Image (cartoon, rainbow, N blue to C red):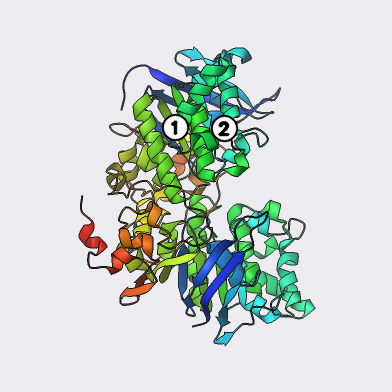
Amino acid sequence: MSSGSPVLSIGALEVGVRRRRGSQAIVRGVSLSVAAGEKVGIVGESGSGKSLTMLAVLGLLPPGLDILAGRVEFAGEDLTKAAPVRLRQIRGAGVAMVYQDPMRSLNPLLRVGYQIVEALRAHGYDARDARRRTTEVLGMVGLADVERVSGSFPHELSGGMLQRAMIAMALAASPKLLIADEPTTALDVTIQQQILELVASLQAQTGMAVVWVSHDLGVVAQLVDRVAVMYAGRIVELATTRRIFQRPSHPYTAALLGSLPRPGTQHRGTLQQIGGRPPDPASAEQGCPFRPRCKYATERCAAEPVLSVRGAEQQAACWLEPGSWST
Amino acid sequence: MILGTDQLSKVYRGRGGRPPVHALSGVSIALEAGSTLGIVGESGCGKSTLARLLAGLESPTAGSISLAGATLDSHTSPPSRERARLIQLVFQDPHSSLNPRLTVEQAIGEVLRVHALVERRRVHDRVAELLEMVALPERFVTRHPHELSGGQAQRVAIARALAAQPQILVLDEPTSALDVSVRAEIMNLLVRLQDELQLGYVFISHDLAMVRHISDEIVVMYLGKIVEQGPYQRVLDAPLHPYTRALAAAVPVADPDLAGQPPARLPAAQAAASTGAAEAGCQYEPRCPLAEAICRQSEPVLRCLDGSHAAACHVAAGPARLTGTRGG
């Protein structure tokens, strides 16, 4: 794990619908810090709040949702208080984001190269430098025929090539932090593998920090140093990648791992099911959000546990004593 | 064998002066009752074209499909109603494969009516029975797709397929659009239904862990052709074709001990070549780290190299077996 001051520091972040009386939080009390050059994974199922948390960081929450409380500091600057102009400067040049579906993140009517040039111009590059930098970053992401890609419209490129182009665009203004939201989910495994290797090598070259949001534990295991597991808008476990996979300390993490066929799982044998469904993120239910689905729930779980230390480099939000349950 | 194909091919005419696309070339598969044939490969390998041909949604350019021993007249279109009943398709995204305006009872009842499987007054009871088979309560009959979670909607899609009393389910990425914890439920359901009903499954997925979990036999496809075929352990644990090895190595493993030290991975493969007219050599040669001179000159044919384990590879078939050149 890298040391030093964090590049991103999220503190007690609450995101939700602001109401005059009793706002409704969907992301609840998320705290996470990412050191310079660190790779952090955020794992969760749909509706767990993982994407909303990252959109909140960038000030890109969809209409109707707001940051209700907490802070988001990027390189020491509180983004929740930053003016829109300042946020636009930080997006791209400080923090860049890559999304799941490159086809929908690019303008279908403009050539790929032009869109990167345009982004760089917005960050103060002159036309010539912007073109030079565009060629450079398209080369960095391993696109063989830079000229052709640059002059193509998005529909003329394959999914893997487009996602490379998106990563090139994200890297263009040399951000300190790259946020990747399921960027390989729509791709073939072989292409996914290439993108993972690409991001790992670019990260090593540039020293940027990476936050990788995914529902795929395997992808995360391969890339990141630390993992935050989210459930119902909260971080329920936070630990180094090795600890999470070897000794999960939250029953939800353990259940997720158990639901995958892994080496050693009996062929056609029953896979572990979690049963039930995640709570409505806006529900006012008290207590541990995983309680209704948890095999080990006790009366104590009627009160919500907070994230607490479970040993070196591992925290979990669970009342159970470490080791008092097993999978 | 309840379902088989013989040298099945599908060529799409090129538009605007472009060359024709050979989506499927000479594919022969065999499926036994109560067993699962897994089909893996990247997008564009022809796995979905195969699914569409099997289900009769399209007719093959050449080759034939046989069902329960009888060769289907592949050139009738639309396919006979009986064939449409016996082979049912389940798609990736249940929310887009179910009609949003129909309730669960209407959606499943439609199948019962079209195939005249039960009397009208029995439809409700039969729908409830089918829901019970997929572990959904009877009260779901009045629900619309938007009122269902992804897992529930996929159960309804499976119940709808079962309504036709098929012998074969063609499952095209049935768990890919679902959350991780829901995938396990659907997989458990599919295994149980297969055991109960002796269904044959053609299980198409890019998720090798799931394919491995449920399949008896596995077919690996590359650019419209079968490059490797055999029992699941053999194909995935001791692959003969370098493409299968690259595919297996690319699967992220949720285990930091394996993930921490990247496996001896094959060199990053370039994007799959176009599916244009076949050239002289092996289609995989441009991406293959083991390619030799012969691979550029003649195309390897699918041959049994080890019992029922077959591969289309000159190198694997040659004296210097892949296992011998591994190491490093």
Q: CA distance from mark 1 to mark 2?
A: 32 Å
Q: Amino acid at mark 1?
A: Gly
Residue B192 on image: x %, y %: 49, 70
Whether A247 is drawn above or below B108: the answer is: above
**Counting other residues with Cα less than 10 Å from the Cα at mark 1, is it few (<14), some (14-19), or many (20 or more)?**
some
- Given residues A73 and B15, the one toward you in this image is B15
- Given residues A225 and B119, the one toward you in this image is A225
Chain at numbered mark 1: A
- Given residues B185 and A144, the one toward you in this image is A144
Q: Looking at the image, which residue is at 49% across and 41% down?
A: A44
* Tag 1 secondary structure: helix
Judged by depth in the image, the label closer to the viewer, 1 or 2, is 1
Please tell me in which quadrant of the rendered image residue A105 appears: top right
**Counting other residues with Cα less than 10 Å from the Cα at mark 2, is it few (<14), some (14-19), or many (20 or more)?**
many
Residue A52 marker: 2
* Tag 2 secondary structure: helix
Residues at discs 1 and 2 both on one chain: yes
Please tell me in which quadrant of the rendered image residue B92 appears: bottom right
Residue B155 on image: x %, y %: 60, 62
Residue B102 on image: x %, y %: 76, 60
Residue A210 on image: x %, y %: 42, 29
Q: Looking at the image, which residue is at 67% across and 59% down?
A: B97
Residue under label 1: A139
Whether A159 is drawn above or below A121: the answer is: below
Q: Determine whether, in the image, residue B135 is placed left or right of residue A4.
A: right
Res. A8 visible in picture: yes
Res. A232 visible in picture: no
Q: Amino acid at mark 2?
A: Leu
Whether A42 is drawn above or below B117: the answer is: above
Q: Looking at the image, which residue is at 36% across and 42% down?
A: A221
Please tell me in which quadrant of the rendered image residue A148 appears: top right
